[in-house]
Amino acid sequence: MGDTQQQQHMEGEQGQSQHFTLIPTLREVTVFKDRAQLTYTATASLPAGSHVLLMKGEKGWDDVLQNTLQVHMDNAADIPVVMNDVRFETTITKEDMRERVRELAKECEDYQDRLNNVADRNSINDALEASIKELEEKLKNMGERSPHTNSDTPSNNTIVPIAQFLSNPTAWQPLVRLIARRKRDIGESRLLLKAEEAQLQKEFLEKQKEVVEYQRASINGKRQTDVVVSVVVPQPVELRLRVQFVALGASWEPIFDIRIGTNNNNNNNNNNNNNNNNNNNNNNNKIDVAYHAMVQQRTTMDWNRVAMRLSTATPHCSSSPPKLSRWNIALQPPPPKIKKMHCFRKAACPAPMAAPMADVMDAAPAMNAEPVMMMMRCAAPVEAAVVTSSAPSSTASTFQIVGLATVKSDNKPVKVTISTHTFPAELMYHVVPKRSPWTYFLAKAKNTSPYVFLPGKTNIFVDNIFVTNSKMEMVPAGAEFTASLGTDDSVVVTRKEVRRKKSTVRAMLRQTHSLIEIVYEFTVKGALPSEATLVVRDQCPTPSDNDIKVEMIDPNKSMLNDGVTGDGIACSMDNVGVVEWKLRLPPGVFTRVFRFAFNVEYPEEFTVNGLDDSDG
């Protein structure tokens, strides 16, 4: 009946509880970080009275967390159904499984014979392939040999037909077709044998597992775990029940496929357009984000065509915040005074730097051991506290997977799709020449979807070509994110130190100071099909001593306040000294040069460490 099977049998006399046996079906699964909540459904047609519903469990029910069992009635809102008892019930039956084990062992032998037959046919194909290859080599050698100039060749009765055959290309066609047909037949046979072998191996392993299970059941008994529900209904009802519980051994992790089109082809096809189109090309770029999840499970229950949800909640954690207990502190007693002991020292043995506590106590029997033991009791613990951070949101995220999903209980990851989105993207180049000569191609976009992008691995595709792997950080809904598209040699930035000069600064009523002037020059070269943005980053040193003064020269303080250099380049600096220039690169071939300069001043009698170019 419907999605479940129902069996009914009466026990005892009239008026006693009727027993119904139901076979529930797995319908929904909610996957958490390290476990999953499984939802089974069953339908029962019940007359008025008291009933005991026995929902037959499948393999694996005895391994679930039994304290998480829940039973809900979906369509009993208008009928006062009373549920008296909900519990798991496990029965163990011992049977003589030897006959079944022998049958399975015979089936395993049959599978092994079939696998051996596949191996024999593969050997035949190997021999045929070797023969064809040998024939081709012989024909090639005969074609290269000249029968008229080789004195060691056989008689003319043998040579003349071969020479005539080789000198007539039209005679080769039947033999060439025969060789090609044989090669094709061998290739097709190999494919069929490979598929047959894979299927046989799969069935063979399943039979072997079944043998192990029956052998285990013959020793320990066969366990059957069911759910028992006692209900009282005042009138006949078609009752739909949902059985939920949590099983360990399931997990999921996010993974992203990011695809970016650079519009290069469109730009090449529209070279005759006006310059306004070039200015808007960057706004036409799109980034496609496919939000996936890799789900795997080993709950011993296969999930076949189930509605799936993915949750970031941690159901095993306490729902209440932790409480603080009293924090006691105490004075540590002063170290005991150890009396000097007169010992003879061997000349060849150097004095140890420090002796273990046990050695000190053994070497000084006159010392009072009580203070030492108190020191050991009062010592701070070695282990550090473990601190975990929480997500920006105060509630967990739940993702509903569209359609039905199937995940086998083999712990192999299955890829399911959470959502797909397309966002406008700003493409830019990013370079840190102090650290790397490479120019990185980035795409910046805003997450306008209602989903939170969780941290996960990312596959990057540019113009439908895989370029690199990356990692997505957590991106809340409405936040911006950046995807790295790998390196790109279309833009090259070089950094060169053009000035490093040390001088002395003298002033009235102030001690003499040393001044170091440092100037770097950046050269940007490249060729682009359209206008683009380049971000260059460098840094000035930050002093850790008040006697050291660092002054920005180019860009100076006024330029940084205005956000633009004298050359019209946007610039900024953060509180740790990282300077950023943002350049608009024109289409075509270009060269840009700008400088970065700062001064370091400090008292003359000191030296400054860390000013080398490799520092920082």
Image: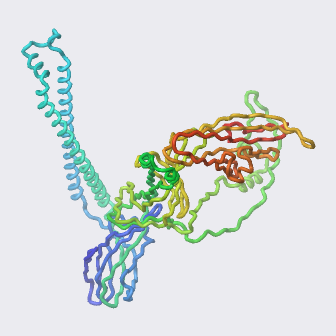
- In the depicted view, which residue is nearer to us: 326 or 356? 326
As displayed, is residue 483 above or below residue 51? Answer: above
Residue 120 visible at all? no
The residue that appears at 44% across and 63% down in the rendered structure is 35
Residue 528 visible at all? yes
x and y, in percent, of residue 356 in the image: 70, 43
As displayed, is residue 483 above or below residue 227? Answer: above
The residue that appears at 54% across and 62% down in the rendered structure is 476
Which residue is the extreme one toward the top? 151
- In the depicted view, which residue is nearer to us: 48 or 543? 543
- In the depicted view, which residue is nearer to us: 591 or 103? 591
x and y, in percent, of residue 419 in the image: 42, 62
Q: Quadrant of the N terminus?
A: bottom left
**Is residue 234 rendered to the left or right of residue 182?**
right
- In the depicted view, which residue is nearer to us: 615 or 73? 615
The residue that appears at 44% across and 56% down in the rendered structure is 288
Q: Quadrant of the C terminus?
A: top right
**Is residue 230 rendered to the left or right of residue 387?**
left
Q: In which quadrant of the rendered view does residue 99 lie?
A: bottom left
x and y, in percent, of residue 124 in the image: 18, 36
